[in-house]
Amino acid sequence: MPRVKMLIMKADQAHPGKFDWTYNVRDVLERTVPPGTGWKDVNQAEKPIDGGDQAIWRKGAFEVLRLDNDELLYSKMSTGEHLVDGKGGPEGKLGSFVDVVLGSQ
């Protein structure tokens, strides 16, 4: 299961109806991805993909962002660690993030 879907499933189980989820939304990416760091700028020439010449998402940039205030709640690029580490229970980073960070939103 893709990591983003694991996050959504776990968060919705813990906090039903509290969050609306989006991912890879162009206007959000345009607002938040630093210029020159998207796929089209960094990866497309080396590893071409269909539509990659327009892609502004960043490879490996698994991030959780509040859209109402653009607060970055989690960034794999910043921490260098996976949030969804395969341990969905309370012992894993995902369980802690859902309970502590998302629970306080």
Image (spheres, rainbow, N blue to C red):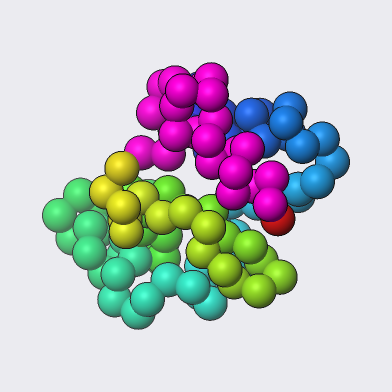
The x, y position of residue 71, in whole percent, is 57, 68
* Magenta stretch: includes residue 30: no
Q: Which residues are magenta?
A: 82-104
Q: Toward the viewer: 20 or 40?
A: 20
Position of 29 with respect to 83 (left or right) is right
Q: Residue at x 36, y 38 (%)?
A: 82
Where residue 23 appears, as percent x and y from the top left, is: 58, 51
Residue at 20 percent of width and 49 percent of height: 47
Which residue is drawn at the image coordinates 37% and 76% (left, top)? 34
Instruction: Note whether residue 91 is visible.
Output: yes
- Eyeballing the image, is 59 above or below 90? below
Is residue 49 found left or right of 18 in the rendered image?
left
Residue drawn at (49%, 73%), measured in percent from left and top? 32
**84 drawn magenta:** yes
Quarter of the C terminus within the rendering = bottom right
- Asked if 46 appears above or below 92 in the picture, the reply is below
Residue 60, percent across and down? 33, 48
Position of 91 with respect to 50 (left or right) is right
Res 8 quadrant in image: top right
Q: x and y percent of residue 55 in the render?
A: 41, 62
Q: Is residue 18 above or below residue 67?
A: above
Quick one: which residue is furthest to the right in this view?
17
| Residue closest to the eye, 14 or 60 | 14
Report whether 49 appears left or right of 57.
left
Q: Is residue 53 visible?
A: no
In this rendering, the count of numbered labels is 0
